[in-house]
Image (cartoon, grey):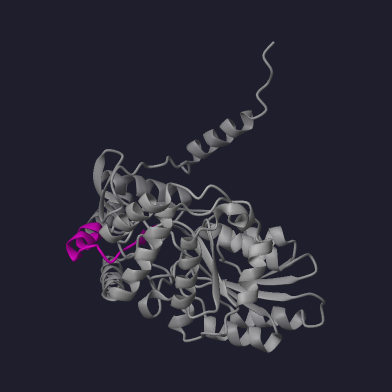
Amino acid sequence: MTAANPLSWLGEQLETWRNAGTYQRLRILESPCEPVSRVDGREVINLASNNYLGLANHPRLVEAARDYAARYGAGSGAVRTISGTMDIHMELERRIAAFKKVEACVVFQSGFTANAGTVSAILGPEDHIVSDALNHASIIDGCRLSRAKIHVFPHRDTAAAEALLRDLADKPGRKLLITDGVFSMDGDIAPLPALVEIAERHGAIMMIDDAHSSGVLGSNGRGTVDHYNLHGRVDVQVGTLSKAIGALGGYVCGQRDLIEYLYHRARPFLFSTSHPPAVVGACMAAFDILEDEPERIDELWENTRYFKSALRDAGFDTGESETPITPIIVGEVKTAHEFSRRLFESGLWATGIGYPTVPEGRARIRTIVTATHSTDLLDSAVEILARVAKTMGILKA
C-alpha cells in the first residue's frame, strides 16, 4: 500500500495559483545583467533588476573578484567567529564604515539577514517596535523573531508614529522606530528628518533599512542619512551589497558597541559562513567606483527623470515614486502578471507584483531604470509598455 503524500497540499496550492493567474515561473537569465539581457532564449530590455549603477558586470568588479579568488581561494572555510574572518573581511567593514561616516560596520551574508538578524538581536519580548506599514519583509521577520511587541503606523504617517511612541512612554522596555529608506515596491522616500526628531524626543532607537538607497541617494550614494544630512542621528543603518553595489551581502553600520554586540549575538552572522573572497573583492572595487565615478549616480537620476516623465505622458499611474523604482499600477494581481507576460513576449522584462507583497487592488508592474540604459532603450520600453497596455485595456487606445 502506497502511503499518502503528506505534502500533497503544496501541489494543490500551486494549481490554485495557476488557475487564478498568479503563478510565476522563474525566468532564467542567460547573460550578464545588462540593459539588454538574454532571458529564456530571447533578447529583452531589462527593467527588472536592482543593478542601479551597472556594476554587476563592471570590468573592475570582475577583475577584482578574479584577483581576490586567486589570492585567497574560493571560500573562507568557516563562520566568522571560528576561523572564517579573513583580513579582507575586516578591511571591507572598515571601508564601509568610513564611507558611511560611522564608527564601525559588520557585513552579513545578505541584506535580509542584516535586517532580521539585527532587530532580533537587539530587542526582546519586553521591548516595543514602531514600524512603517510598508517596511520590507526582512524587517517584519526580524520584528517577529525578536518577540517584541509590534506597533504598525500607516505608511509615512509621522504623526501616527509619534502617537504610538507617546502611548508607550510609560511602558517598560526599549523602543525602536524603524523604516525603510526607499520603499522597494513604491519607490517613495521615508520622511526621515521627522522620524529622527520623533525618535529623539521619545528616547527611541532609530533604525533605517537603506537597501534601495545605497548607491542611489546621498553624496556618492551614501544613502538616505546622507541625503538628509542626518549623520550621527540614526542609531542603526542597514545597507546592501546586492543592489547598486552589484555583488552580494548586507551590512549594518553604527556605534562600535552595536557592531561588537552583533558580532556576539546576531544569529545569521554567527551561523553562516563568511563571504567568499571573490565577493569581497568585487565589493571593494564597487566602493572604489562610487568614490571615483559619482557621475554614474547623476546618469541614474537623469534616466529616472526621463523615464518617469515619459510614463506619465503615456498615461500610466506611477503612484508616489520619487526614485528609480517606478511602479505602474494596474489594480488586480491577474492583470499585472498577464501584463508582465505580454511585455516579455514583446521584448521587455518587467515583473508583475501583487498581494501579499503589495496591498490588494494595488498590483503593479515594477520597473527600475539604471545608469546604463540609453534614452533610445527607454523610449523603446515606453513604446512597448503603452502598446501592450492599450491592447489589454489598461490604457485607452
Magenta stretch: includes residue 371: yes
Q: Which quadrant is the N terminus positioned in?
A: top right
Closer to us: 87 or 346: 87
Q: In this view, does 297 lie to the left or right of 165?
A: left
Indicate whether 60 appears above or below 232.
above
Closer to us: 388 or 372: 372
Q: Which quadrant is the C terminus positioned in?
A: bottom left
Residue 328 seen from this side: no
The answer to which image quadrant residue 130 occupies is bottom right
Q: In the image, residue 104 lies at what x, y percent? A: 55, 74
Determine the residue positioned at 60% across, 88% down: 197
Q: In the image, residue 280 lies at what x, y percent? A: 43, 59
Read off the magenta span.
366-382
Closer to us: 371 or 121: 121
Q: In the image, residue 12 lies at what x, y percent? A: 58, 32
Determine the residue positioned at 76% across, 65% down: 124
The answer to which image quadrant residue 132 occupies is bottom right
Q: In this view, does 298 lie to the left or right of 126?
A: left
